[in-house]
Image: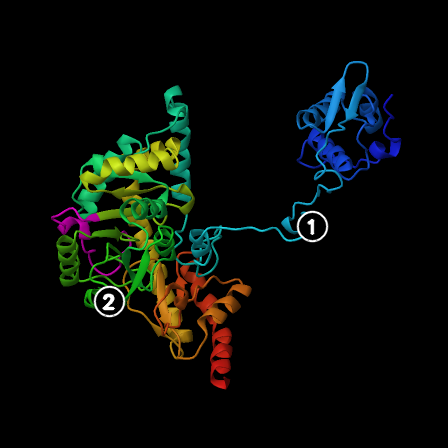
C-alpha cells in the first residue's frame, strides 16, 4: 500500500489568493516543485482531492485541475482504488532538479558541467550585429513617431468596425502576398506620392521593412556574393545580408549620397546594392540625380539588383521630395521597400515591397514557406484607414508637428551645444545628426546619457569603415516644443565632461 505523503509536504503550500495566476495553476506549480525536489517521493500517495481541498480551503475542482495537469505530464499516476500516486517512472534528470518558482533566467539550474552549445557561423555573425530591443519613447529617441490622440481615436474606431464585419473565412490563413484591397490602396498611393511605377499585383505586404530585406537577400543572393551598403547605414540591412551570408562592401556617403565611384573601385562586380536615396539613414542626405542614374546604369550592365529603402520619405521639411529611384528604373532592377512603422506606429509591423514582375512568384513561395503571411485583421484596418482618407491627413498633420519640433530642437542645440558640436543640415526624417569634436568617445557619451533617461544613439555604431565619425542622433518627436530647450540644456554638462576626459586622455 503506498505511503501517504507527509501532511506538512502539502499542508505548507503557500497560495497567493490576490495574485493574477489562477489558484489551480499555483497549486500545480507547488506540487510539481515538491516532486522534483524529492519532498514528495516517487510512490507516495497524495491526499484525495476532497481532503486536500478542505486542508487548503479550496474548491475541489481547483485541486482536481491541478492533479489532472500533473497526471497529463507524467508526474502523477491515478488508478481506481489506489488514489493519486507520485509516478515511480520519473526521469532521473528530473528528480532532484529544483523547478524554480522564480521567473528569473539566472535562477534556472544548469545541471552539472558546461553544456556544449554550438550555433552556426550564420548565428554567430548575426549575434554581433546590434538589434532593436523593445522600444519605449524617451527624450530624443530617434526614428520613432509621435502617437497623437486623434490617430488613436480613429484607429480604434476602425478596429471596432473591422472586427464586427470579419467573416469566418477571414479567420483562416491569409494570402502570403497580402490583403489584395490593401495592395491596391498602397499601389495607388505610391504611384501618386512617390512616383513608383507599379500595379497592385507587384505590391507584397510584409511584417515591416526588415522582413522585406530578409526575403530579398535570401532570394537573390548566394553565400559569398557581394553587396554594396551605405556607410554608415541601418543595422537591420547588415543583419539581413550577413544572414545569407553575403560579403558586405561598405561604401562611404557624402552630401550627395552613396559614393558610387568608390563602390566601383572597391567591388564593381557586386550582386546587389542597398541604398536609402531619399533620406539616407542615419545621415539624412539625399542622393542626387546623377548618382541615381549612375547606380541604375551599373545594375543594368551587371545584371545586379538594387534595394531602395524609402525610409521616412513622407517627412521632408524643405521643399518637395525627390521621387523614388524605382520610378526611373527602365530595366526592373530595383526592389522598392517601405514601411508604416515611422508613419503610423512601430507595433503595427506592416510594411511592403514593390517587386519586379519576374520576382513575384519566387517571393510568394518564399514568404509562404517562411510564415504564411502577415496578420489579416491589421491589414483590413490599415486598408480602411487609407481608403477613408485618414492616411494623407495624418501625414500632413504629423509633418507640420514634426517641422515645429525639429525647428525647436535645432534652436536648442545651437543655443546650448552649438559651441561644442556640429549640426547636420538634413531636411528630412525624424532626427538631427550632430558631430562631436575629435577624440570624444560617442559610445561612452551615449551610454552616459542613457543612464540619465535620454535615448541618444551614437553615430559611430552605424559604421563599418574606419576611422569612424563620432556623433549623436537626436530625435525630436518625443518632446513638445515647450520642453525642448530645457531637455537640451540638461545634456550640456554631460558633453562637457566627455570633452574634458577626451582632452585629458
**In the rendered structure, which disc, 1 or 2, sits on the residue that comes first in sequence?**
1
In magenta stretch: residue 323: yes
> In terms of secondary structure, where does tag 2 sit?
helix
Mark 1, mark 2: which one is toward the viewer?
Answer: 1
Q: How far apart in space, not on screen, are marks 1 and 2 (Cα)?
A: 51 Å
Q: Residues within 10 Å of mark 2 (few under 14, many from 20)?
A: some
The tag on residue 112 is 1
**Residue 298 appears in view:** yes
Quick check: 461 above or below 361?
A: below
Label 2 belongs to which residue?
Answer: 266
Q: Main secondary structure of the magenta part?
A: loop
Quick check: 338 above or below 40?
A: below
Residue at position x 20%, y 46% from top? 193
* Extreme residue toward the top, this view: 80
Q: Residues within 10 Å of mark 1 (few under 14, many from 20)?
A: few
Q: Position of residue 379 (x, y in %)?
A: 35, 34
> Which quadrant of the structure image shows residue 349?
top left
> In terms of secondary structure, where does tag 1 sit?
loop
Q: Where are the magenta residues, as a range?
A: 314-334
> Is residue 51 found left or right of 255 in the rendered image?
right
Q: Position of residue 168 (x, y in %)?
A: 40, 20
Residue at position x 76%, y 22% from top? 59
* Extreme residue toward the bottom, this view: 504
Q: Position of residue 308 (x, y in %)?
A: 25, 52
In magenta stretch: residue 197: no
> Which quadrant of the structure image shows residue 93?
top right
* Figure disc tally: 2
Residue at position x 68%, y 48% from top? 111
Question: Which quadrant would the N terminus be assigned to in this image?
Answer: top right
**Residue 185 appears in view:** no
Amino acid at each position: 500500500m503506498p505511503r501517504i505523503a507527509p501532511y506538512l509536504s502539502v499542508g505548507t503550500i503557500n497560495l497567493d489568493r490576490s495574485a493574477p495566476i489562477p489558484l489551480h495553476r499555483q497549486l500545480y506549480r507547488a506540487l510539481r516543485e515538491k516532486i522534483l525536489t524529492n519532498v514528495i517521493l516517487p510512490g507516495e500517495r497524495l491526499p484525495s482531492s476532497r481532503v486536500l481541498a478542505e486542508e487548503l480551503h479550496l474548491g475541489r475542482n481547483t485541486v482536481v485541475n491541478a492533479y489532472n495537469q500533473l497526471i497529463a505530464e507524467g508526474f502523477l499516476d491515478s488508478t481506481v482504488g489506489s488514489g493519486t500516486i507520485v509516478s515511480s517512472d520519473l526521469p532521473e534528470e528530473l528528480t532532484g532538479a529544483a523547478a524554480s518558482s522564480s521567473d528569473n533566467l539566472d535562477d534556472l539550474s544548469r545541471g552539472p558541467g558546461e553544456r556544449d552549445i554550438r550555433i552556426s557561423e550564420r548565428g554567430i555573425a548575426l549575434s554581433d550585429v546590434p538589434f532593436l530591443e523593445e522600444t519605449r519613447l524617451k527624450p530624443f529617441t530617434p526614428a520613432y513617431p509621435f502617437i497623437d490622440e486623434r490617430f488613436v481615436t480613429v484607429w480604434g474606431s476602425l478596429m471596432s468596425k473591422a472586427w464586427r464585419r470579419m467573416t469566418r473565412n477571414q479567420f483562416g490563413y491569409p494570402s502570403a502576398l497580402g490583403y489584395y484591397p490593401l495592395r491596391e490602396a498602397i499601389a495607388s498611393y505610391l504611384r501618386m506620392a512617390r512616383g513608383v511605377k507599379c500595379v497592385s499585383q507587384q505590391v507584397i505586404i510584409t511584417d515591416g521593412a526588415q522582413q522585406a530585406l530578409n526575403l530579398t537577400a535570401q532570394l537573390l543572393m548566394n553565400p559569398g556574393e557581394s553587396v554594396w551598403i551605405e556607410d554608415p547605414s541601418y543595422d537591420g540591412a547588415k543583419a539581413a545580408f550577413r544572414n545569407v551570408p553575403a560579403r558586405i562592401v561598405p561604401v562611404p556617403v557624402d552630401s550627395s549620397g552613396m559614393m558610387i565611384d568608390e563602390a566601383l573601385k572597391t567591388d564593381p562586380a557586386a550582386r546587389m546594392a542597398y541604398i536609402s536615396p531619399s533620406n539616407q539613414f542615419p545621415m539624412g542626405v539625399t542622393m542626387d540625380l546623377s548618382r541615381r542614374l549612375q547606380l541604375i546604369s551599373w545594375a543594368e550592365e551587371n545584371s545586379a539588383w538594387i534595394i531602395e529603402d524609402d525610409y521616412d520619405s513622407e517627412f521632408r521639411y524643405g521643399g518637395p521630395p525627390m521621387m523614388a529611384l524605382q520610378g526611373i528604373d527602365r530595366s526592373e532592377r530595383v526592389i522598392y521597400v517601405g514601411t508604416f512603422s515611422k508613419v503610423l506606429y512601430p507595433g503595427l509591423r506592416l510594411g511592403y515591397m514593390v517587386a519586379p514582375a519576374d520576382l513575384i512568384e519566387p517571393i510568394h513561395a518564399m514568404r509562404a514557406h517562411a510564415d504564411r503571411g502577415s496578420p489579416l485583421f491589421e491589414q483590413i484596418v490599415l486598408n480602411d484607414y487609407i481608403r477613408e482618407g485618414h492616411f494623407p491627413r495624418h501625414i500632413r498633420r504629423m509633418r507640420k508637428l514634426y517641422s515645429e519640433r525639429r525647428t525647436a530642437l535645432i534652436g536648442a542645440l545651437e543655443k546650448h551645444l552649438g559651441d561644442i558640436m556640429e549640426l547636420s543640415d538634413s531636411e528630412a526624417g525624424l532626427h538631427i545628426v550632430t558631430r562631436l569634436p575629435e577624440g570624444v568617445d560617442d559610445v561612452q557619451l551615449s551610454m552616459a546619457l542613457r543612464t540619465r533617461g535620454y535615448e541618444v544613439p551614437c553615430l559611430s555604431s552605424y559604421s563599418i569603415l574606419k576611422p569612424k565619425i563620432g556623433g549623436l542622433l537626436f530625435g525630436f518627436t518625443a518632446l513638445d516644443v515647450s520642453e525642448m530647450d530645457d531637455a537640451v540644456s540638461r545634456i550640456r554638462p554631460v558633453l562637457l565632461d566627455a570633452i574634458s576626459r577626451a582632452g585629458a586622455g
